Image (cartoon, coloured by chain):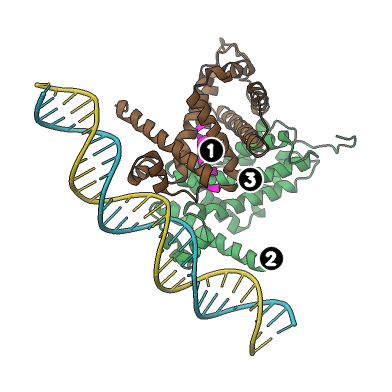
Chain colours: A brown, B green, C yellow, D cyan
Amino acid sequence: MTSRHSIERDDARLAVSRHAAKLFVDRGVAGTSGDDIAAAAGVSTRTVWRYFRSKESCVEPLLARSARRFSAQLREWPRDTTIEAHLGACFALDRQAPQDIADGVLIVRLIALLPREPALRTAWLMACHQGEQDLIGIVANRLDRSPGDFDVKLCAATVAAAIRVIDETISMAAVSHGQTFTTAEVVERLAQAIRAASPLPFCDPVVPRIFGA
Amino acid sequence: MTSRHSIERDDARLAVSRHAAKLFVDRGVAGTSGDDIAAAAGVSTRTVWRYFRSKESCVEPLLARSARRFSAQLREWPRDTTIEAHLGACFALDRQAPQDIADGVLIVRLIALLPREPALRTAWLMACHQGEQDLIGIVANRLDRSPGDFDVKLCAATVAAAIRVIDETISMAAVSHGQTFTTAEVVERLAQAIRAASPLPFCDPVVPRIFGA
DNA sequence: GTCTGCTGGTCACTAAATGACATATTAGAT
DNA sequence: ATCTAATATGTCATTTAGTGACCAGCAGAC
């Protein structure tokens, strides 16, 4: 089974990932060595390279976890609810664990580094790509369509792009210009962007398709 | 000036890039060393690492050139023409130089490798990201809006995502399932996807905005 | 011609990444 | 509780990726 051992291994990877991300924002990617990451995380250098195929990809588990949390929330989106209502319910601050908030801050700082750290951009784009794959399933399910359907894939891609642009825009504004956002503002902009980006009508209550294809 | 010397340098980079791409499709990324690329391209290993910051990024000039050719064509898109008409005119096979066609098949093969070569996916996503940046200017210009405008950025992102999905879908179908496409089919699917993905109306003839903002 | 600026090659080096092998940790069987 | 098999980690050696320092060749300016 992939169960116990693998889960603990994932936790260990995530812990190293957080340390790596912190070092990257503090001293830059070039200024952080594999040895540094290993020392900070309290594991051997060899373990770092066993966990990650490259230095940049050290941040992937952190980004992936955040993306998967978001996907999981979208999967529980009731069919009779608008996207605004659902996102609003999800983003209520009291529903976020402290660890998740800390992760969020770290990720925002990472995103703000992207223009000066091309190596990190690859990790970020890989995480967005994973999120896009998850979205395919979500959109397909919500619209009672097949995940292999081209229109579904296209919709997932455009919506993922919209989410990415919002993430980048808000993160840059927050870090570079000290701007702050209420969760209500974030939800509103996110919902607007997703609506604008989506070629398929999955943002509003969907009715069960009683009459065939 | 950035002119003469730099242009030659770019040509040299592009030549190495083609050799690297060919090696990657033939023997895989892991099976190709920096020395191999240098030997194939007829330059010293040191020059390879002067040209590229990493092994994967060796393919970037090839992808970037193709993306920039596409961007350049979109920039010349007359305002009174639909996207179908313009793409149809651009993709006429007799308008493509043999070198560009060869580059095209090489790129298609690279794209087909993406599922098995995560390292290449980073290069591909970086190229798509560059294409997205170019699209921002194109959309802004066509709609008489500012490139800083959020809606313009969002539109560029969704359209870039649509183009990427089409590229991936068609490349995989061609290589993995031996499917073939006429240019007319490619143009049609591309145009349809871009239309579906675009939240702003830039696919049809646009009228000059005579009255203010 | 010389001077200047740029590019590429050689060689020595650091850092990233992998292989081989030993040791610990743990789940599960008895 | 103890043994076993599997998996995870550490240590050390090695390879490969990538950089720094320095020199040689080759434009164009004068």
In front of the other: B130 or A151: B130
Does residue B11 appear in the picture of this structure? Answer: yes
| Callout 3 secondary element | helix
Q: Is residue B1 magenta?
A: no
In the image, residue B44 sits, relative to residue A42, either above or below, namely below
In front of the other: B47 or A18: A18
In the image, residue A98 sits, relative to residue D25, either above or below, namely above
Judged by depth in the image, the label closer to the viewer, 3 or 2, is: 2
Q: Residue at x 53, y 38 (%)?
A: B169
Where's residue D8, x and y in %? 29, 36
Where's residue D20, x and y in %? 49, 64
Amino acid residing under circle 3: Gly
> For the magenta stretch, what is the residue range?
A118-131
- Near mark 1 (Cα within 10 A), the count class, few <14, some 14-19 or many ≥20, is some
In front of the other: B120 or A144: B120
| Callout 1 secondary element | helix
In front of the other: C13 or B26: C13
* Residue of label 2: B3
* Residue of label 3: B131
* Residue of label 1: B169
Nearest to N terminus: mark 2 or mark 1: 2
Displayed quadrant of residue A212:
top right
Nearest to N terminus: mark 3 or mark 2: 2
Alpha carbon separation for disc pair 1 and 3: 18 Å
Chain of the residue on which disc 3 is drawn: B
Where's residue B88, x and y in %? 69, 44
Where's residue C16, x and y in %? 42, 51
- Of the 4 image quadrants, the one containing the N terminus of chain B is bottom right
| Callout 2 secondary element | loop
In the shown orientation, is residue B72 left or right of residue A137?
Answer: right
